[in-house]
Image (cartoon, helix red, strand yellow):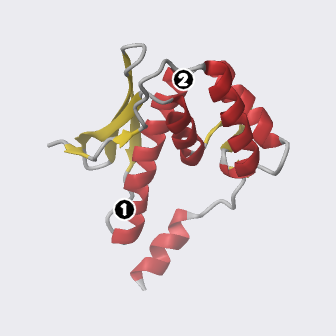
Amino acid sequence: MKHGTEPTVSQFRLVKRKESLIAKRAIEEAKLEGNRFYCVWQDEDGTTEFLTIRGAYILVRLWGNCWIDVGLESESNHAWTFKATLYDLESRVAIGRLHQQLKPAEDLLGTAERDALFGTGQSKAIKKAVEATLPQWLIHKCIDAAKTVGVPISNVLPTIDLSVVRAISRQ
């Protein structure tokens, strides 16, 4: 059973895109967004910088002549698998990416938390499609510009002990 959402549509332009103008506007907007434009993931292999969903949507909007479709590709007891495809109407390219989002145990989280994780899975699939389709030089220039104005959103969060969560939820 597949569940789709309405596509995120960028404005269709009757003129060919000008990458230098798009880059200028994207860099300006990335500076204005600052840490809302990109994230940082740190682990034992080093640091990885990537777009937030907000940054991805900004780039799609400015790139123009493209749209994104995202849907639920499959579902199991333990995970949802989402597929997002970015369709570039100007270059006639469509690139899709999958993202598997683990589901929480039924007794751990309520409906609101499960819905939030579902949305997170959709967002991650969209970001993967945008990062795979749009030029890497544009993404990197925008992230570099955003870094000049703030501290990024990071994965450095307190660790949650699931045994404590389970014990609390049973009370």
Please tell me which residue lies in front, 110 or 87: 87
Give whichever of discs 1 and 2 has the lower sequence position.
1
Please tell me which residue lies in front, 113 or 2: 2
Which residue is under mark 1? 115
- Residue drawn at x 67%, y 35% is 25
The C terminus - image quarter = bottom left
Q: Quadrant of residue 112?
A: bottom left
Q: Is residue 73 left or right of residue 121?
A: left
> Can residue 163 be seen here?
yes
Q: Quadrant of residue 118?
A: bottom left
- Residue drawn at x 67%, y 43% is 38
Return the residue found at the far left: 1
> Can residue 108 be seen here?
no
Q: Is residue 72 above or below residue 150?
A: above
Q: Is residue 46 above or below residue 119?
A: above
- Residue drawn at x 14%, y 43% is 1
Q: Is residue 141 above or below residue 54?
A: above
Disc 1 secondary structure class: helix
